[in-house]
Amino acid sequence: MEVEKVEAKTAVATAMEVEKAASSAAAPRPQFKPLKPHEMSDRKIEFRKVSVPQHRFAPLKRCWMEIYTPVYEQMKIDIRMNLKTKKVELKNRADTPDISNLQKSADFVHAFMLGFDVADAVALLRLDDLYVDTFEIKDVKTLRGEHLSRAIGRLSGKGGKTKFAIENSTRTRIVIADSKIHILGSFLNIKIARDSLCSLILGSPAGKVYSKLRTVSARLAEKY
């Protein structure tokens, strides 16, 4: 009886090994290439249009090739300036490798129109977790006249010192356009920068904000 039990166990073990070998030798799962934009949208061409503010015409003309080259050559997106409608028009192509490239390119051009440098805005094409957040000073505190001017001055600091300190500590880029503030960065870093700017708007001394930023930058250095 014992001999029969041993033989039965051996047979079961052998059968399991054969099944494992058969499963491992099975054909691998098919690997499909990602669909191109024109294949996903039933061959419909998609467009994006970005308005050009009057004060950004001269910078756009000056930096056009720096904007055109990464969009057309790297992202494979057609781009042109429509002088009648005063808009930059973007269109996907048959050889556009990824459907998200059109929106990334539109975000890149929009960031430039908000006032960011091309060298900073181009990061939107290369990284997926970057965003632009916009808010106004009146969203934080209702200020008018000289009080508003002083708040804007506190945000920039002497020679832009405060703004640069916040940018370097939080790894973001900040544009202060009148009473509007635009922040370019990752979700977490934008939140830290926005909290610092809100503290300044509410009247916190710059020294107190600097000390908080030193703590935050130390944490970010440990995290990364």
Image: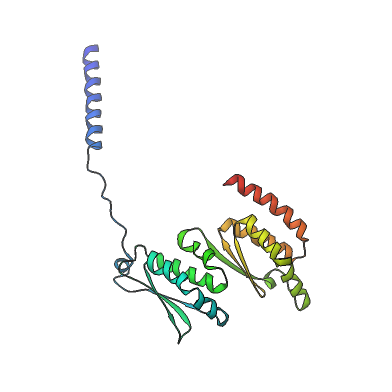
Q: Position of residue 4 (x, y in %)?
A: 21, 15
Quarter where residue 179 is shown: bottom right
Q: Position of residue 112 (x, y in %)?
A: 53, 71
Q: Is residue 37 above or below residue 23?
A: below
Taking depth in this image into account, of 203 and 53 the one nearest to the observer is 53
Quarter where residue 135 is shown: bottom right
Q: Is residue 59 above or below residue 171?
A: below
* Residue under the image location 49 percent in, 68 percent down: 108
Confirm whether residue 1 shows in the render: no
Quarter where residue 148 is shown: bottom right
Q: Position of residue 103 (x, y in %)?
A: 44, 68
Which quadrant would the N terminus be assigned to in this image?
top left
* Residue under the image location 22 percent in, 25 percent down: 14
* Residue under the image location 73 percent in, 57 percent down: 209
Confirm whether residue 212 shows in the render: yes
* Residue under the image location 39 percent in, 64 percent down: 74
Q: Position of residue 151 (x, y in %)?
A: 74, 70
Q: Is residue 178 above or below residue 5?
A: below
Among all residues in the image, which is located at the extreme top? 2
> How many numbered discs sit on the rendered protein?
0
